Image (cartoon, grey):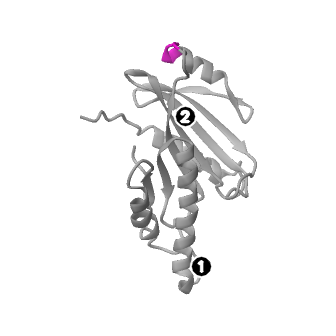
Amino acid sequence: MVLPPGWVRIPLRGGTWEALDEKVFRGIEEIPEGVPREKGMAFRLAVRRRIGRMVGEARKAGGLDLYVPARARPGVLMAASFLVSELARPEGEAASPEVVLGRLAGDRRGGEGGALRGVGGTVAVRWEYVEPPGGEDVDMYARHVDYVLPVPGDDGRWLAVNFSTGGDGAPGSEFTRALAELFDALMTTFRWHVAE
């Protein structure tokens, strides 16, 4: 997957804390406007702690990788992230990926059904919806874009890729919708790599 400038991958199954230190804490090269220079270290620590909490939640959700913007653009950090997780087919479910995708497309998220899309040479189900504030770190409405897709050649394994953004604080604004479109553009670069 091709990431936009300033975004970093935090692996969740190994090397997590090293990545947080190197890519997030040290990776914040520019402190956002409005943060006094003498508060730069405190800002970096606060961002690292917040992303550290996101890492804990992502691991509980079965996450493989967490992607976050770690550089200010322009002068502010973007409130967005996405998580790649592995899903297992439910025990006793012997349906083909096509049947499962059809069922998933009927699921509703935020009142909307899913849509089928091509991703990485396979078919995925995509949802886009808005959720109200909730949880310790979520104090605004968030726009979500979720993809679920089968792992080619292994009918029992699936991936979920879940994007979330607070955007500019308004889930229906042009800016917030543009971030969702940016994520969709990232998903067009998704490719499978078979480990040898």
The answer to whether residue 189 is above or below residue 20 is: above
Based on the displayed image, in which of its 4 quarters is residue 127 positioned? top right
Main SS category, magenta section: loop
Pick out the residue farthest to the left: 196
Asked whether 95 falls inside the magenta stretch, the response is yes
| Secondary structure state at the residue bearing disc 1 | loop
- Residue at image coords 57%, 70%: 46
- Residue at image coords 56%, 22%: 90
**Magenta highlight range:** 94-98
- Residue at image coords 53%, 31%: 148
The answer to whether residue 59 is above or below residue 41 is: above
Residue identified by numbered label 2: 147
Asked whether 42 falls inside the magenta stretch, the response is no
Q: Earlier in the sequence, mark 1 or mark 2?
A: 1
Residue identified by numbered label 1: 35
Residue type at numbered disc 1:
Val
Residue type at numbered disc 2:
Tyr
Q: In whole angstroms, how far apart are the C-alphas of marks 1 and 2?
A: 36 Å
Which disc, if any, is residue 46? none
| Secondary structure state at the residue bearing disc 2 | strand
Front-lying residue, 122 or 86:
86
Q: Residues within 10 Å of mark 2 (few under 14, many from 20)?
A: many
Q: Residues within 10 Å of mark 1 (few under 14, many from 20)?
A: few
Front-lying residue, 143 or 59:
59
